[in-house]
Image (tube, rainbow, N blue to C red):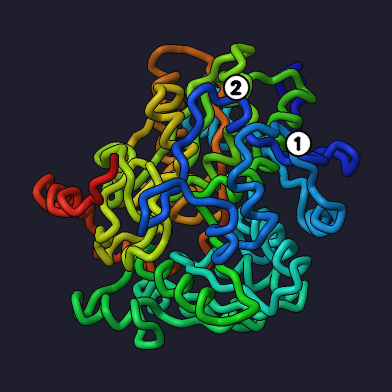
């Protein structure tokens, strides 16, 4: 066997090699992400103001731009041991099928009940809510991975969990919904008649299939109007990217064990939790001038916040009750077409990733839906894992890059994030196989209408 083949198919860390701290990439950013703004005063949100919505410790993490490493509490590290470390897999079979000289690795985050990376932050946020003595938490979920993860974490810690699920996903993914209910969560299709903001959205957009922006508005309203509850979320904000850095820290440690240096790191991008977590330690090296990597964010053409959005302050939710964030945005009223099958449905992008993208430290690509499912099917048939539609955006570009290496003869090392499995996404796979899936792409005129409603800030 050649020296190359001595690298195992799956690289695992030992228990004592697992990260003891999360990495806060903001500490190494020369240009910090812009602060969240109060929607009433348009002034930076204070800790006291944020504390009315979020847990106290999470507010501290949200506002901390200076501390590079934040210790992971022992209780959370013990919970992580149930499903972490997750494997870094060498895609030998895919390489062979593609006949590419590229070396392809993927970090697989689907080996837990939630079926995705979302549990990494769900248990952290639930832990801090429990420590604060709260009764429960509220949240939104798109495809359902985040809602599933949070319901599992809340069940473990004895917290009530109220989930507002984007209506189109609620209807398309009943089994994901039932997993949440199995873990004790209440699940409501959003927008709904159960909140003031939900009723307002339904009145303005009759028959709407919903969006994450709608569901966020409802979840926040319920949190602030019920004593003993706080709102938590699965993506976008600084605190979530911090918790998800465990993905990148494990990935880098696994690569370092075999002296592997990636040339490019690829991740799907909706709100930014998976991508931000995967790239964090690599981006840290890039920011400090210690190494260089090509970092690629992959988003759907049907919801192209990076590639066709504008970098501006916008509301984080459709109901305009949440703080404003400076991010690449399509406009908080934007609702993706219901035929879009993935969970990458958010109108904006993480302020951290938005700043890094604006500074030219990473690139972004938008891909059509049918091509994403073609890549998903190709990967499933070769590597034996049915990937989530979200992850399949990264798979699509990883395959594209591997084929470029075949043309040029370059032996690049490609790492991508496989955020989870697609076993609850079979309605989407069915539409693809039956030829009922199309590549809806919003027009410039449509996007211009949403951009025209952006708040006037500064």
Quarter that holds the C terminus: top left
The foreground one among 222 and 22 is 222
Look at mark 2 in the image and give the residue it sits on: 262
Residue at 74% across, 35% down = 69
Quarter that holds the N terminus: top right
**246 displayed left or right of 198:** right
Residue 228 x/y as whole percent: 65, 78
For marks 2 and 1, the one nearer the N-term is: 1
Q: Quadrant of residue 171?
A: bottom left
Q: Does residue 246 appear in the picture of this structure?
A: yes
87 shown above or below 66: below
The foreground one among 269 and 432 is 269
153 shown above or below 370: below
Look at mark 1 in the image and give the residue it sits on: 11
The foreground one among 444 and 145 is 444
Residue 359 x/y as whole percent: 41, 23
**Number of numbered discs on residues:** 2
Q: Residue furthest left?
A: 445
Q: Give how far apart the Cα atoms at labels 2 and 1 are.
A: 15 Å
Residue at 54% across, 15% down = 411
Residue at 80% across, 43% down = 71
Residue 360 x/y as whole percent: 40, 22
Residue 166 x/y as whole percent: 39, 71
Q: Secondary structure at mark 1?
A: strand
**Are the residues tagged 2 and 1 within 8 Å (C-beta)?**
no
């Amino acid at each position: 066997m050649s020296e190359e083949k001595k690298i195992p198919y799956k690289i695992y860390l030992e228990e004592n090699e697992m990260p003891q701290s999360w990495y806060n990439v903001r500490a190494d950013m020369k240009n910090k992400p812009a602060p969240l703004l109060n929607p009433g005063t348009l002034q930076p949100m204070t800790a006291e103001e944020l504390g009315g919505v979020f847990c106290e410790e999470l507010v501290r993490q949200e506002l901390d731009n200076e501390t590079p490493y934040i210790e992971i509490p022992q209780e959370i590290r013990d919970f992580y041991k149930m499903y972490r470390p997750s494997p870094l897999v060498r895609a030998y079979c895919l390489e062979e099928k593609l006949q590419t000289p590229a070396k392809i690795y993927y970090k697989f985050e689907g080996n837990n009940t939630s079926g995705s990376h979302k549990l990494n932050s769900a248990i952290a946020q639930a832990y801090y809510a429990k420590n604060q003595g709260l009764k429960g938490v509220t949240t939104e979920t798109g495809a359902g991975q985040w809602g599933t993860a949070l319901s599992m974490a809340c069940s473990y810690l004895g917290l009530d969990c109220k989930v507002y699920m984007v209506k189109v996903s609620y209807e398309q993914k009943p089994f994901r919904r039932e997993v949440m209910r199995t873990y004790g969560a209440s699940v409501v299709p959003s927008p709904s008649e159960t909140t003031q903001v939900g009723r307002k959205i339904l009145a303005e957009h009759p028959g709407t299939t919903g969006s994450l922006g709608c569901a966020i508005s409802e979840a926040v309203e319920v949190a602030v109007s019920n004593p003993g509850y706080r709102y938590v979320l699965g993506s976008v904000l600084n605190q979530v990217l911090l918790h998800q850095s465990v993905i990148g820290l494990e990935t880098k440690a696994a690569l370092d064990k075999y002296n592997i240096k990636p040339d490019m790191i690829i991740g799907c991008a909706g709100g930014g939790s998976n991508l931000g977590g995967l790239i964090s330690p690599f981006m840290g090296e890039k920011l400090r001038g210690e190494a260089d990597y090509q970092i690629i964010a992959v988003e759907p053409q049907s919801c192209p916040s990076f590639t066709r959005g504008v970098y501006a302050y916008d509301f984080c939710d459709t109901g305009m009750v949440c703080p404003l964030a400076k991010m690449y945005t399509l406009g908080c009223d934007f609702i993706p077409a219901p035929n879009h099958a993935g969970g990458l449905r958010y109108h904006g992008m993480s302020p951290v990733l938005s700043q890094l993208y604006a500074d030219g430290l990473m690139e972004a690509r938008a891909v059509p839906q049918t091509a994403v499912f073609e890549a998903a099917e190709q990967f499933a048939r070769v590597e034996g894992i049915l990937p989530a539609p979200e992850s399949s955006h990264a798979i699509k570009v990883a395959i594209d890059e591997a084929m470029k290496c075949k043309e040029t003869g370059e032996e690049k090392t490609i790492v991508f994030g496989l955020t989870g499995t697609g076993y609850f996404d079979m309605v989407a796979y069915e539409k693809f196989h039956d030829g009922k899936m199309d590549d809806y792409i919003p027009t410039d005129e449509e996007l211009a209408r949403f951009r025209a409603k952006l708040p006037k800030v500064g």
